[in-house]
Amino acid sequence: MHPTFAVPVQTTERDFGVRIPRPLGNGPSRFIPEKEILQVSKVDPRTQSIFEDAFAALGRLDNISLVMGFHPQYLESFLRTQHYLLQMDGPLSLHYRHYIGIMAAARHQCSYLVNLHVNDFLQVGGDSKWLNGLDGAPQKLQALGELNKILAHRPWLLTKAHIEHLLKAEEHSWSLAELIHAVVLLTHYHSLASFTFGCGITPEIHSDGGHTFRPPSLSQYCVCDIANGNGHGHLEERRGNHQVSEVSGEVEVLMERMKQLQECRDEEEASQEEMATRFEREKTESMLVATAEDEECVPSRDVSRHFEDPSYGYKDFSRRGEHVPTFRVQDYSWEDHGYSLVNRLYPDVGQLLDEKFQMAYNLTYNTMAMHKDVDTTMLRRAIWNYIHCMFGIRYDDYDYGEINQLLDRSFKVYIKTMVCSPEKTTKRMYESFWRQFQHSEKVHVNLLLMEARMQAELLYALRAITRYMT
């Protein structure tokens, strides 16, 4: 029997029982005010055209791209590389590519990226049974689980035996070209998970976790808004003003230190032994920097089914005080070794990655907060080299004593958390470093962290592959 409707003069959606979703967050990021992100694309025609191209290629413009839009030159390079990895001719089938993206993002419990690629995986004809868990996927993909785990958390443990295991698995073997493609995808999505958490990226309204059907509460905030840090903007502003008076001078202090370091550099050069000692000291200290409050993050079943051994992470390594061996860049570098290996086995990708690394590393507007005409090279190099130092990678020509001069403790905690355990990054940590700097500058820092992390993982993987081949 059909129910009869009494039709009111003015029908509303509610009368038809349609539930209207409402976005959970305000804008693409929990950390950056929505109006700042939206102003970027309005002001800059180049950003606008990149957004249009991305939308045409993917049929969507995701929140990651909107936040990266602060830096259009970088965004262009990023999207070109990602498009090539996922959609252009390559050794791996399309559904394998998206599945590897899911596996990599799941390692850091990044449900935002997992959901994005679950949809893409199904769209390119992937078998939904694989999504029930890694054990439902083909043996060949399951075999990648160990590489995924080590690369994400402790890449220095990767050996040529791991590579051999994948390349000599009889009917489930990987070819060298396929393995390079897989390694680039794994490192791309591990580091993109870092960026996603580091910028507080929120799910789009149509995604899981991006909407609610609850009506707005009287005060216009629902509990979830407040949990997401979106409640009571005026409180934030009040606290912000208080903070500014507390930290005024932070930028000037940093600029003065850069100047002094430059002068010391000009006057005297430390010996090779002293430089090696400073590196070891910094590496050991970086192990002792705690990540965010060491909260336990329990992965949801949705995400954890895509990988094995959820207790394996960066944290238990640092607690046990294992030794991270030193990886010397002059023995194996991206420029001299990694780049050509990738380009040989997966043409054009080495070139695309190289442009993206260079773009993040060299990007500068010669500003620091409110100061113009500042050379930020020293600061960018300290950030990049600190991340590589945490992974045991040493540049012989760099004085690691500079890192402690330029990166304060709250910044180091943020860097280590975002790079090693990104799922623990909090809004408070994002706000507590470089408090006088613009959001666009913090996003730039996150691009540096993401690319330095990706390059570090790649170096270990490519070195292991090279050792297998020789």
Image (cartoon, rainbow, N blue to C red):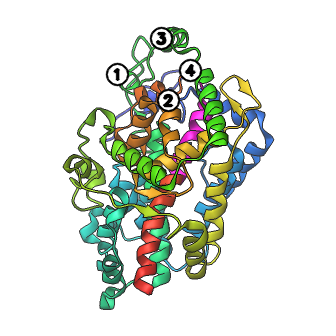
- Res 31 label: 2
Q: Disc 2 residue type?
A: Phe
Chain-order first, disc 4 or disc 3: 3
* Disc 1 to disc 3: CB gap under 8 Å: no
Residue at the spot of label 4: 250
Residue segment shown in magenta: 436-451
Q: Is residue 308 left or right of residue 24?
A: left
* Disc 2 to disc 4: CB gap under 8 Å: no
Question: Is residue 437 one of those drawn in magenta?
Answer: yes
Residue 207 falls in image quadrant: top left
Residue 297 appearing in the image: yes
Chain-order first, disc 4 or disc 1: 1
Q: Disc 1 residue type?
A: Val
Residue at the spot of label 1: 223
Foreground pick, 216 / 440: 440
Foreground pick, 302 / 84: 84
Chain-order first, disc 2 or disc 4: 2
- Res 239 label: 3
